[in-house]
Amino acid sequence: MIFSLAWLSLTISLGIWWWVLGMRQAKTISEISKTSESRLELERMNRMLKLEGSFFLTMLAGGGITLAFLSYRDHKRSKLISDFFSTVTHEMKTPLASLQLQIEGLIDDNPNLPITKRLEKLLKENKRIESRMAKAFYLASLMQGEPLYLETFQAEELFEHLKMDFPNLQMEIQSESKRPIRGDKRALESILKNLVENAVLHGKATQITIQSLNANTNKAHIQVTDNGTGFQGEWSQLGEPFLRHTVTSGTGIGLYIAKKLMEKMKGKLILKPLDTGFMATLELPSLS
């Protein structure tokens, strides 16, 4: 929207300047000319310049106004979509959490019944939907440009819920660094959860290692590695949204959101292939 308005202002200004300059030149030449034939020819050219210049400016202004209108319409449509995502994800949080508690209660009360396996599968699907809704929430917040809540905390605080979210996964936590990091805790938890989900669902990983590393710089590093199959698609396209690299791969929204969230926290997400598995490094601002 801002670009279209700037383009409109610039092009109209240039057009007016060109038109005024042409009029001045035509007037000067007309005053210099002595013969009546020359004056008639100059008057004809002057009229032509006025008509063509007016047409040019009209088309230029019309194109700029159309561009501004289309940009405004697309911006409004984008805002409606992001508002819809925000509303849906907010409204779905409570029923999904309630459903999860009820399923977990049924499993705990009836651990040996034949229906327990079906309940466990239902619980798994509920968590998968909850994860998708979290991605939609962050995608909507990124589209709206909402700020993150930055705070200072220890990296170990991010790892507390990961083992609870993946109880059947062999997960090793290594905390080498005790330096506090600065970021949005909720966003970082979502990023780590997404990385682990990708490793399990798409990389078929059975073991995850998460390390909080020491660094000699003013940056903190959290490294996630797995023993899965790694990434099988085009490496340069990794993290592009709505792009499937293989039949079994995801949509890329999770990594796209992770990269954008890291950028908003003045950090970055570094992805690297391994001989066996995959490695992702979260680089964040740190306090000495």
Image (tube, helix red, strand yellow):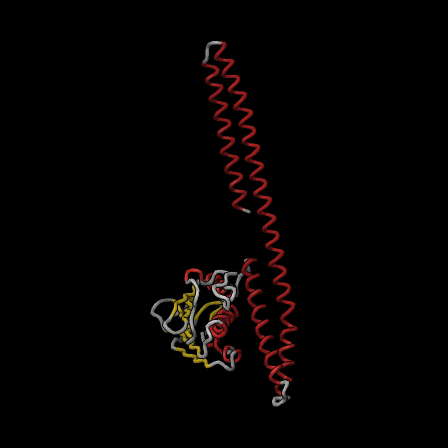
For this orientation, the residue located farthest to the left is 216
For this orientation, the residue located farthest to the top is 35
Image coords of residue 118 (percent x, y)? 62, 82
Q: Quadrant of residue 284?
A: bottom left
Residue 59 seen in render:
yes
Q: Residue at x 48, y 60 (%)?
A: 240
Viewer-nearest residue: 215 or 81: 81
Image coords of residue 221 (percent x, y)? 40, 70
Residue 285 seen in render:
no
Viewer-nearest residue: 209 or 22: 209
Image coords of residue 61 (percent x, y)? 56, 36
Viewer-nearest residue: 163 or 218: 163
For this orientation, the residue located farthest to the front is 247
Viewer-nearest residue: 77 or 25: 77
Q: Residue at x 57, y 43 (%)?
A: 68
Left or right of 213 on screen, residue 47 = right
Instruction: Point out the image quarter for the C terminus.
Output: bottom left
Q: Is residue 67 above or below residue 205?
A: above
Q: Is residue 53 above or below residue 260?
A: above
Image coords of residue 123 (percent x, y)? 60, 78
The number of numbered discs placed on residues in the rendered structure image is 0
Q: Is residue 244 above or below residue 100?
A: above
Left or right of 98 on screen, residue 55 = left
